[in-house]
Image (spheres, rainbow, N blue to C red):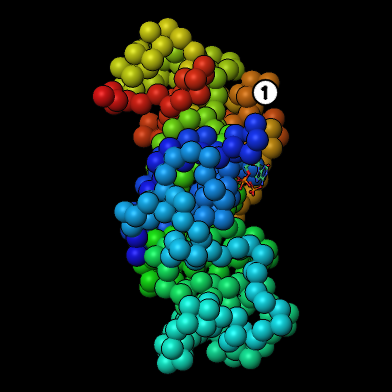
Amino acid sequence: MATIELRQVEKRFGNHQAVKPLDLTINDGEFVVLLGPSGCGKTTTLRMISGLETVTGGSIYLGGRNVTWLHPSERDIAFVFQLFALYPHLTVRQNITFPLQAQGESQETIERRLAEVVRLLRIEHILDSRPGKLSGGDRQRVALARALVRRPAAFLMDEPLGALDAEFRESMRAEIKQLHIDQNATTVYVTHDQVEAMAMGDRIVVMSNAEIQQVGTPAEVYHDPANLFVAQFIGSPGMNLVKGHYIGGQVIMPGDNNRYNVPTDWVPALNRATGGDGDVIVGFRPEAAVAASDGELLGQVYATDMHGAYTVLHVNMNHDDIVHVRSNRRTTYPIGTPVRFNLNPQMVRFFDPVTGQAIRREVVQ
Ligand code: ATP
């Protein structure tokens, strides 16, 4: 297996910059998810790693070897697409063994590897069927088997679960993750679904506008988003982002006398970022805002979403400033009820409203 390293890799289609120069190292055995909205450049990045797309600039290394200008077949990488790309006229068995036949492997090796992947993916019962007769989940298992049987240095997967319905998608997600744990193969996985990315990735590369916004573990991108884009894109709903004015250890927030006392460990960073008197954006996840009768902040209930274990209140702090607040499932809040809430001091974050970047407590050297 292998490390994948992108150094200043970029792609232009004519005048259109599909991927701006990016640096990324994917460690041996790591499962990395490229996540971002449609058109942000994630598929193009994956295709450049595979060799299906040439780079406009930069270099790609696989296991320390410069593969930038090698043909896809010379890169020792397997690609799994959303559209299962199986040969319709071949049986499952023939589809899976095809890459090994093409490589000229011996019949004994082919049989041994076939048996291994068939056991791993539990597809014994469909070996003699043709792809047209299979369910979406089974077709995707066959596509995975065909990739696995080659034992490549790395796997690239482009929205492999995109064509499946929600129920299959969840179980396949767990299966792919389990396969990864079994095989420990370096994997790069593209999706626009942040739930999938959070569930599967060892690390997530969040992309937007043809560039990387943040690289981090699921917990890092969720709790410490690098900027406003990541804060909103990760989470359902995303992070609450409320404009305020920082002065004297407090943020004056929208609404009626909503003065938020900043946790003391944030005061030096906010003084530094605002010069002691300036605008900030306060960020907090719905679960960091907790309804309480003596809460520091006040708003009015605008709508409620029942989630079973808890209720999410849509709280109007002032006109357009509606935030999501988590409340006890047993308390009911008619629309228009005033509601007070506190912010968990460990979970509050701040952003620069001009650059959109997170304000960090530690000084970055
Ligand atoms: P999606 O999830 O919709 O596939 P993506 O993040 O994977 O989105 P890419 O497919 O990488 O995005 O596309 C990035 C940008 O490059 C888009 O603006 C797209 O229109 C453009 N693009 C991709 N392939 C080509 C091509 N062959 N010729 C011209 N433009 C292209």
- Pick the residue in front: 266 or 329: 266
Residue closer to the observer: 59 or 123 = 59
Query: Which amino acid does the dot numbered 1 rest on?
Result: Asp
The tally of labels here is: 1
From the image, tell me which residue sits under label 1: 320
Q: Residue at x 47, y 82 (%)?
A: 104
Q: Is residue 287 visible?
A: no
Q: Is residue 361 left or right of residue 308?
A: left
**Snapshot quadrant of residue 133:** bottom right
Helix, strand, or loop for circle 1? loop
Q: Looking at this view, is 19 or 60 the one in front?
A: 60
Q: Is residue 197 left or right of residue 59?
A: right
Q: Residue at x 40, y 19 (%)?
A: 261
Residue 49, image x, y percentages:
48, 52
* Vertical relation: 22 (above or below) 365: below
147 or 327: nearer the viewer: 147
> For the C terminus, which image quadrant?
top left
Please state the quadrant of the image where ligand 1 appears: top right
Q: Position of residue 26 (x, y in %)?
A: 38, 51
Q: Does label 1 point to a residue whose CB lies under 8 Å from ligand 1?
A: no
- Residue 193 falls left or right of residue 184: right
Identify the residue at horizontal 65%, vertical 74% (top origin).
86
Residue 316 percent coordinates (x, y): 64, 27
**Among all residues in the image, which is located at the extreme left?**
365
Residue 358 in view, yes or no = yes
Give percent across and percent down for residue 185: 39, 65
Residue extending farthest to the right is 132
Q: Residues within 10 Å of mark 1 (few under 14, many from 20)?
A: few
Name the residue rendered at 34%, 60% in the picture: 2
